[in-house]
Structure formats: structure tokens, C-alpha cells
Image (cartoon, rainbow, N blue to C red):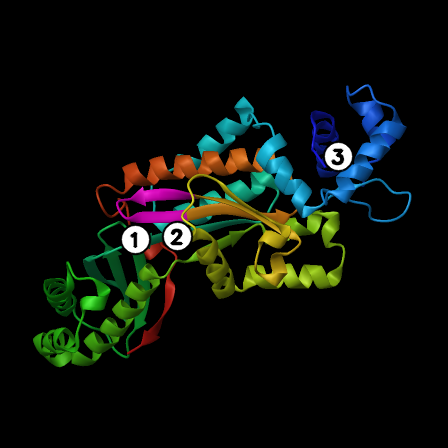
Amino acid sequence: MALDDRKKEILRAIVEGYIKNAEPVGSRSIAKNTDLNLSAATIRNEMGDLEEMGLLIQPHTSAGRVPSSMGFRFYVDSLMQKYRMTAAEIENMRSAMFHKMRELDKIVKDVSSVFSNITSLPTFGMLPAVEYGTIKSIKLVSIDDRTLMVIVADNCGLIKNKLLRLREGVAEEAIEEMNRVLNENLSGMVGSEIRLENIIEIQKAVGENIEIMSSVLKLVHEAISEIDKREVFMEGSSNILRFPEYNDIEKIKEIIGLFDDKEQLNDILRTLHTDNKAGVQIYIGDENKAPQLKNNSIIFSTYNAGPNMTGVIGVIGPVRMNYAKVVSGVEFFSKQLSEMLSNGLEGGIPPGLNPKNELQDKGEES
């Protein structure tokens, strides 16, 4: 059965009506609110054909129709008109993007939060994967008499902080000596290149502070591992509760559970991202392999943060969403993030790092 222009316009009207009102769309509504100049009876016949083709679903007898996942897919691929953002929306996005440069993870987290507020959907940001990222610097900073902060930065500007709590104080001269030894032995190395002989050499060089240095090296290893791992930020998870699709408590538990399970979410997003498609990618309903996402759609795009650094930003929401507007938002944020981070991270570590004012990871006591 051919999908002629009339069927396409009826399908478009149903998808957009359902997106707007979250209610099945009937033939009378289409006849009244469109310029098709067709009778309700003719529209019902066409809707019946679209249902046979798998593009529409009738929830129950005498109800209107709602789009199936296949119907949404056809709409996104062939019928959706490009959404033109208003001047106010663009200005709001720009003002959120061009703030003072800070660490990469905080930038992506903040942008994801702003994006979630604008779309009213749960939004995720995945930090870039760093190919052949090398250690640029390691710095120990005294926070108080018995606390050191271990700051590890790579050549692409990613920074991780770890706290080390000491059993007793250590002199500033000893801290400076440990900084020198660490950077002389580890600066310029990829994490996977660090061998036991490197560690032994470092421990020998610090003499009586070998116990402290052992703890420092453990935290350096943790920091490098976290930089290498693609961290995912999930913002606006509670926004999902605004949608009538999630009135069922079991559905709420399932999707919120996924949002809270960062490791599983990371695996799902990495699987989708390995397709290496250009531009905005859209996975609708059953196209998602994860069972928790069968009634949801994922829209995302990559952004560049510098040479060999590619991250991901996008949204997760119900199959019934305003695809045109969300796609435009994803395009905008990914492009602006690319421009902002590629320019801002060219020189390496962002300026203005004040260890005492930064969010700190938990450390260990030595």
C-alpha cells in the first residue's frame, strides 16, 4: 500500500496532535484543525490504512489513533519540519554556554542542567574519551595541617582532584620535593605506561616520606582511571514525571533506576555512540536495545573538546516528544560545546583553578 501525500499529511497531523496533547487523535479533530478539506469519514478510512501499515495504533475501540514507534520514525525521517528557535531561546542557550571556563566535567554537567531546564526532559552529558591522553602535571597542595589535595591534569585539560588525609602534618619543603619527584617521573606518560619500576623509583626518591607517597600514588592511579573513564552526568531526571506516560509506578521505578545506574547508562550510551554516525542520532522506542528504554527515545549528538576528544550530549524521554525542537536544541548545544571547549582547552589546563574552592573527591587517610 502506497503512502501518498494525503496519508502523509494525516500522519503528520496525528503525530503532532499527539505530541501536543498526549491524547489519541480522532478524525473529527483532523478535519477541524487542518487544511486538508476532507470529511471525517474519508480521514477515518485513511487512518485505517495507516494502522494496517503499522504507522498508527488504536488504543481501544472508538478511540482516535496514536503513532506507533514506526510512525514516529517515519515522521522524524520524512515529515518533521526543522524547528526554528526563537531569539529568546538562542540567547538563553548562549548565556548558559559562555560562562567562565572551568574544568571540563563541570562545564558539561552545567550545560546538561541548562539543557534539561530548557527541554523539560532528562538530559545527559558524556565526557570525552581521550585517546592517548598524557599526564601533564601532578600537584600536591596543602589544604590544612593534615590534608593534602592531589591534583592530576592531562594534556587535554581534564582535571581530577583527590583528598589525602594524613596521620600527622608534613612540611611544605617535603611537599615541594614530592611534587618535583612526581612530575619528573610521570609527566608526559600515558596512564597505561606507568610500570612498577616507575613507582619504585619514585618511592626511593622521597626517602622518609615513602608511606605518604605510596598513598599519593594510589590516588594518582584512581584519578587517571577516572579521567580515562567516560563519566556520564544525568540532569533533570525528575522531569520524566511530568509526562502522563509515567503514571505507572513500575515504569517510574524502571526509568529512574536506569538514570541512577550510571555504569549501565554509560554502557548503553557507549554502545549507541560506537555507530559513529555524523550529526544528531535518534533512537525511537523498540530501536533501543535496553529493555528499560523500549517506551522511550534517545536523541544525542557528539561534541569535540579538542584533538582526539569526543563527547556526547543528548536527552532521554518518552516516545511522544517534540522531536523538531529537541533536535534543534541538541544541534545547538553540541555545536556550541565544540566551539567553546575546542577554543578554551587549546592551551591545556583551564585558568583559575583554586583547589580549596573546588568540589573534592573523597580520598583516604595515610
Where does residue 356 sit, x and y in percent of width and height? 32, 56
Range drawn in magenta: 302-311
- At horizontal 60% and vertical 37% (from top left) the residue drawn is 76
| Lower sequence index among marks 1 and 3 | 3
Q: Residue at x 84, y 23 (%)?
A: 32
Q: Is residue 294 above or below residue 313?
A: below
Kind of residue at badge 1 = Leu
**Residue at 67% across, 63% down:** 253
Check whether the beta carbons of the residues at disc 2 and disc 1 lie within 8 A of each other: yes
Which secondary structure class fits the magenta region best? strand
Q: Quadrant of residue 207 in the image? A: bottom left
Residue found 34% across the figure and 45% down from its top: 102
Q: Is residue 18 visible?
A: yes
- Circle 3 residue: 14
Q: Which residue is mark 2?
A: 127
Quadrant of the snapshot with the C terminus: bottom left
